[in-house]
């Protein structure tokens, strides 16, 4: 049972218990009391208030920081209206009409309540929520959630250091917990990758162009880190930095902006056209007869026709065609002096 469900059951039980106590009490609180305490309707009233409380919690929970500001603004506006009315009477005593005092207080109470809410929708103010999340009025391009895959990958530090990534980078606590679990894993590869991810986070804190934050917001009623990331991105209007293919597709279906480092890496690969020449180290045999295979610095596979006898050598090749697959790009080439090799 989730903590949220447990809390709601406790709230419901508390209201029912209070209603039962009132039902057992005999008599009236006062002669003017509209409902007798012993009346069974008290139980229904308690149940109704329990349901209303839980509904209000569900509506306001994700925006609890702003409603705290709005409540303070409501109280401050109410009393500010009273003070301004009295000041108005001091300055313009001849025009002071007691009947307008409630309108002063109502107007300023309204402004005090709705200004913080409107500010978050239109980007007017910068509020810091009690949850430790970034300001929700920022654009999705300014707030980026980091998932586990992009942290342990490590390239995010190099990209951020160049200045191509800016704004707020948010690491949810549940992502940190997952990395910590991997760091304690018995698998040496997972353990080393997770520890490298923790080192990357420490390095990101030193970059002045980004603001690294830890979010304590969690969703105990949801299962899976990916599901929680998507829900958090919806709440704070953030994009997600990831290398995870499945998370990429699910988030896109949910209408969340995805920044995939693998897509960025593919976009940054040098664009070669048929007929262009470059030098390659042939390192192994290809799948087809008499083929050699080499790799560019970014990992792109280069297939060299008639390159089997050139394994271990550096060879000048000419591009013949390029094949784009789901696994990446494959460049097909032939040696620059192809006719001489065939002889």
Image: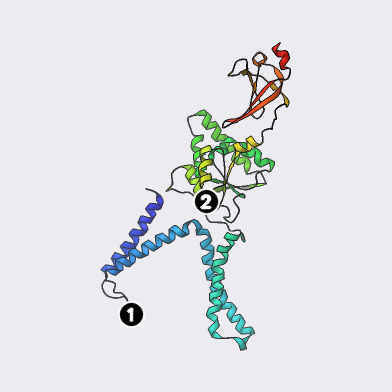
User: Is the residue 126 above or below the residue 342 in the image?
Assistant: below
Kind of element beneath mark 2 = helix
> Which label belongs to residue 32?
1
Nearer to me, 12 or 244: 244
At x 32%, y 64%, the residue is: 18
Q: Residue at x 39, y 63 (%)?
A: 52
Q: Position of residue 230 (x, y in %)?
A: 51, 47
* Residue 144, above or below 69: above
Whether residue 54 appears in this view of the structure is yes
Q: Which one is closest to the eye, mark 1 or mark 2?
A: 2
Residue 158 lies left or right of residue 100; in this view the side is right
**Residue that label 2 marks:** 234
| Residue extending farthest top | 343
Please provide percent x and percent y for residue 47: 33, 63
Q: Residues within 10 Å of mark 1 (few under 14, many from 20)?
A: few
- Which mark sits nearer the N-terminus, 1 or 2? 1
Which element carries disc 1, helix, strand or loop? loop
Q: Is residue 215 above or below residue 285?
A: below
Is residue 84 or residue 144 the one in the foreground?
144
Q: Which of 153/238 is in front?
A: 238
- In terms of image quadrants, where is residue 326? top right
| 53 relative position to 122: left or right | left
């Amino acid at each position: 049972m989730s903590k949220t469900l447990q809390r709601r059951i406790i709230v419901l039980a508390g209201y029912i218990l209070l209603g039962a106590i009132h039902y057992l009490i005999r008599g009236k609180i006062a002669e003017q009391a509209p409902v007798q305490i012993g009346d069974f309707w008290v139980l229904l009233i308690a149940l109704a208030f329990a349901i209303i409380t839980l509904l209000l919690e569900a509506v306001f929970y994700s925006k609890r920081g702003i409603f705290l500001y709005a409540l303070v603004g409501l109280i401050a506006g109410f009393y500010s209206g009273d003070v301004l009315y009295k000041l108005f009477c001091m300055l313009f005593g001849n025009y002071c009409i007691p009947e307008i005092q409630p309108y002063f207080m109502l107007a300023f109470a309204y402004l005090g309540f709705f200004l913080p809410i409107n500010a978050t929708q239109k980007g007017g103010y910068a509020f810091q929520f009690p949850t430790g999340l970034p300001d929700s009025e920022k654009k999705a391009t300014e707030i980026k959630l980091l998932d586990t895959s992009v942290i342990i990958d490590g390239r995010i530090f190099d990209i951020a250091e160049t200045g191509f990534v800016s704004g707020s980078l948010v690491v949810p606590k549940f992502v940190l917990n997952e990395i910590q679990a991997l760091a304690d894993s018995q698998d040496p590869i997972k353990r080393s990758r997770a520890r490298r991810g923790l080192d990357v986070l420490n390095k990101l804190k030193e970059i002045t162009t980004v603001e690294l934050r830890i979010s304590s917001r969690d969703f105990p009623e949801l299962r899976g880190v990916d599901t929680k990331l998507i829900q958090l991105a919806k709440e704070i209007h953030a994009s997600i930095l990831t290398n995870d293919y499945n998370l990429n597709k699910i988030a896109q279906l949910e209408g969340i902006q995805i920044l995939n480092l693998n897509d960025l890496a593919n976009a940054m690969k040098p664009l070669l056209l048929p007929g262009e020449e470059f030098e390659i180290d042939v390192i192994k045999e290809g799948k087809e007869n008499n083929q050699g295979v080499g790799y560019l610095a970014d990992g792109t596979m280069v297939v060299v026709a008639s390159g089997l006898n050139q394994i271990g050598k550096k060879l000048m090749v000419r591009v013949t065609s390029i094949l784009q697959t789901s696994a990446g790009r494959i460049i097909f080439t032939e040696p620059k002096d192809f006719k001489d090799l065939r002889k």
